Image (cartoon, rainbow, N blue to C red):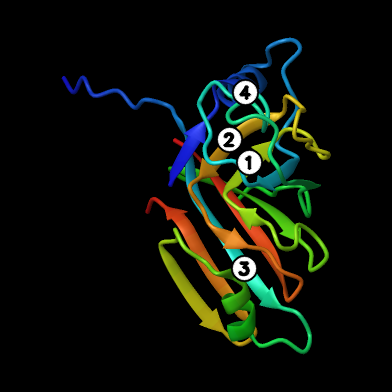
Amino acid sequence: MANVNMTQGLKVVGDRASGVAGAGGAMAGMSVDDNASFTATDTNAGSTGGAPAHFQGNALDSTPTGPAAATPYVVSHVMTLTTGQYNTFVVKRIGLHNSNAPGAATNTLMFGIDGLALTKQSTFSLVITFKLSYS
Amino acid sequence: MDNKVNEPRVTVEEVSGVIEAAPGTTIYEALRDAALSGFKSIVVEGSKATVTWLKRS
């Protein structure tokens, strides 16, 4: 299992913080799929391993809220896979996107974690929390 | 003089999931169906189970 900071994601964070013209959008969506791993240079879910056999991208449940200033400063991003989504497929990767409609080929992949194994079924919903730390 | 410099960085701090059993299903049935592996911890409470895949602190 490994977490990956995509270089694309670091650029978006830095550009937004410094007010660079044309900065990419904020984190707005999350995805799950069954490819094996991420790479730091990935821009979309198909960058490593090709188009995933199974993919589900959703908007975040709500706009993230910022806690009180702290070191490190941690922001939570939450997304729900409903009882009707991604059923019978294995969640191997989770991706954080700067789009509220992330697709398998949209270049919106900012951060990710791989090496997971959870078989989604209709007998449960799954609420994923992806926390980023700024320090 | 302390030459230590704080290096600003963005880090994936924690990734977790809450499995909530659908009506008519126990959390244990849901966990059986999930066939989990590759996680750091799991806490079951009522009809929910919190699975932690990554946690730095």
In the rendered structure, are the residues bearing label 1 and label 2 in contact, judged by CB atoms less than 8 Å apart? yes
In space, the residues marked 4 and 3 are separated at their CA atoms by 31 Å
Task: Give the mark nearest the N terminus, 1 or 2.
Answer: 1
> Which of the 4 image quadrants contains residue B23?
bottom right
Return the x and y of residue A82 as percentages of the image width and height: 79, 64
> Which image quarter holds the C terminus of chain B?
bottom left
Return the x and y of residue A123 as percentages of the image width and height: 73, 76
Q: For this rendering, which residue is in front, A47 or A15? A: A47
* Residue at the spot 60% in from the left edge and 41% down from the top edge: A35
Quick one: SS at disc 3?
Answer: strand
* Residue at the spot 18% in from the left edge and 23% down from the top edge: B2
Task: Bin the neighbour count of mark 3 within 10 Å (Cα to Cα): few under 14, some 14-19, many 20 and up.
Answer: many
Q: What residue would you read off at disc 2?
A: A111
Q: What residue would you read off at disc 1?
A: A95
In space, the residues marked 2 and 4 are separated at their CA atoms by 17 Å
At label 3, which amino acid type do we have?
Val
Image check: A135 left or right of A30?
left
Chain on which label 1 sits: A
Return the x and y of residue B27 as percentages of the image width and height: 62, 83
Tag in front: 4 or 3: 3
Q: Which mark is residue A78?
A: none
Quick one: SS at disc 4?
Answer: helix
In space, the residues marked 2 and 3 are separated at their CA atoms by 20 Å
* Residue at the spot 76% in from the left edge and 28% down from the top edge: A105
> Which image quarter holds the N terminus of chain B?
top left
Q: Are marks 1 and 2 on the same chain?
A: yes
Q: What residue would you read off at disc 4?
A: A17
Task: Bin the neighbour count of mark 4 within 10 Å (Cα to Cα): few under 14, some 14-19, many 20 and up.
Answer: few
In space, the residues marked 1 and 3 are separated at their CA atoms by 17 Å
